[in-house]
Image: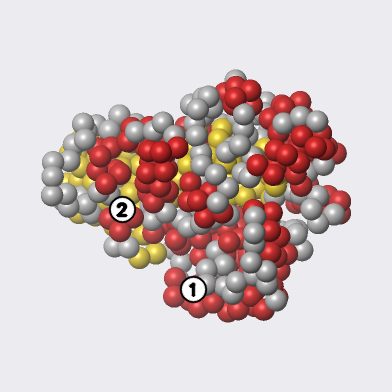
Amino acid sequence: MILLKNGTYINWQTLEFREADILVEEGAQGNLVFSPTEGHPVPSKVIDCTGKYITHSFANGHHHVYSALAMGMNPPRKNPENFLEILQYIWWNLDKALDLEMIRSSALVTAIACAKNGITFVVDHHASPFAVAGSLETIARAFDEAGVGHLLCYEISDRDGLDSARKGLLETEHYLRHRQGLVGLHASFTVSDDTLERAVDLAIRTDSGIHMHVAEDNSDELHCLEHYGMRIMNRLDQAGALQFPKTILAHCLHLDQAERKIVAQSSAWIVQNTESNLNNGVGHFSSSGLGPNIMLGTDGMHSDMLRSAKAAFFAGQEYDSIDSYETYRRFRNVHHYLSRNELTGDGENNLVILDYDSPTPFNQSNFPGHFLFGIESKNVRHVISGGKLIVEDGQMLTLNEPEILAEAQKQAERLWAKMK
């Protein structure tokens, strides 16, 4: 157990500020005991939180571990002129070159970055067409070592042939026998009716849901109209992909109003990935008509959810209807997604301690303003996951960060060489 002394607790749902000592219990069902009495067990660790703020840690609604070794790599052999070429010459070239060693390094690097930024739960969407078997368990074990909760899936696709799609389905089914996860699909334009049907059937059999990219670029919608005679949401609805409360639809930029109504009336959740959309030049997110089930992700761009929240707010001033309260609501919606679906790893004993010296009053009524314009990941001092301290004074306790980064550089060089 950990005792947090003299801190100010901020309830992540009500934003109520409360000064108290907090005893943090370990385990998936661990609780927070406020102002503990002498009858409670003696804590193994005491942290002085004087002048600091304690609140629920963060979670990422859509990440890509496989992008972790891309930073600084050489430009593609052809300068992409559109979104499809970005996929073809960069990301599909990269994911084909991955092996299990590279995937493990990518997962460890991602877990470290997440933890140090206050993220203790990650929803990840993975692809490695020539290293499918064992890829999800490799990522899961790396996250477990770091102490970061996870909800993983493999990006099943027909783009590398039917055998590759079959391997993705087998990897997913094997993984879901032992772990919580989702049935991943790439996007409508790379998934045949047969593969889509098999994925939905697998989600039904495993009490899971679908996790896929939807209308990230308008070419996805045009492909669906040309090949299936309908728009993407109609296709997914007819296939049964929207029936699951665990289903996650990433992006959803180019949906028409009828499609937005289908989403709003379904059980599915949407993940907004503002910086990725800007980077790829695919369009801007609008929440119009989509309903309340919108959360935030990073789409593999980085592992900083505070940064993603600010990007959603600033871009939304021109392209969306979003204020500071709505930004914070979307930022925290991932916790509601996890809780409602009874997914483990995001308990109340997942905490972040912020060292935030504000030059202005900071309280319940003006918290959203500080959330957007004051608090940054540099303010993350300590991180607790499942009641265990995984980051102390900004340093990882569960992993040897220098050793992992040194190994990641070697794996990045291997990856870049293979991509040539």
Q: Amino acid at mark 1?
A: Leu
Residue visible at 17% across and 41% down in the picture: 362
Position of 312 compared to 282: left or right?
Answer: left
Q: Amino acid at mark 2?
A: Glu
Describe the element under mark 2 as helix, strand or loop: loop
Mark 2 vs 1, N-terminal side:
2
Please tell me whether residue 230 is drawn above or below residue 67 in the rendered image.
Answer: above
Viewer-nearest residue: 224 or 205: 224
Please indicate, yes or no, whether residue 95 appears anywhere in the rendered image: no
Mark 1 crowd level (few <14, some 14–19, many ≥20, 10 Å Cα): some
* The disc label shown at residue 405, or none: 1
Please tell me whether residue 105 is drawn above or below residue 375 in the rendered image.
Answer: below
Q: Position of residue 241 (x, y in %)?
A: 71, 31
* The disc label shown at residue 13, or none: none
Position of 318 compared to 223: left or right?
Answer: left
Viewer-nearest residue: 3 or 69: 69
The residue wearing badge 2 is: 376
Residue at the outermost front position: 81
> In front: mark 2 or mark 1?
2
Please tell me whether residue 252 is drawn above or below residue 171 in the rendered image.
Answer: above
Viewer-nearest residue: 237 or 48: 237
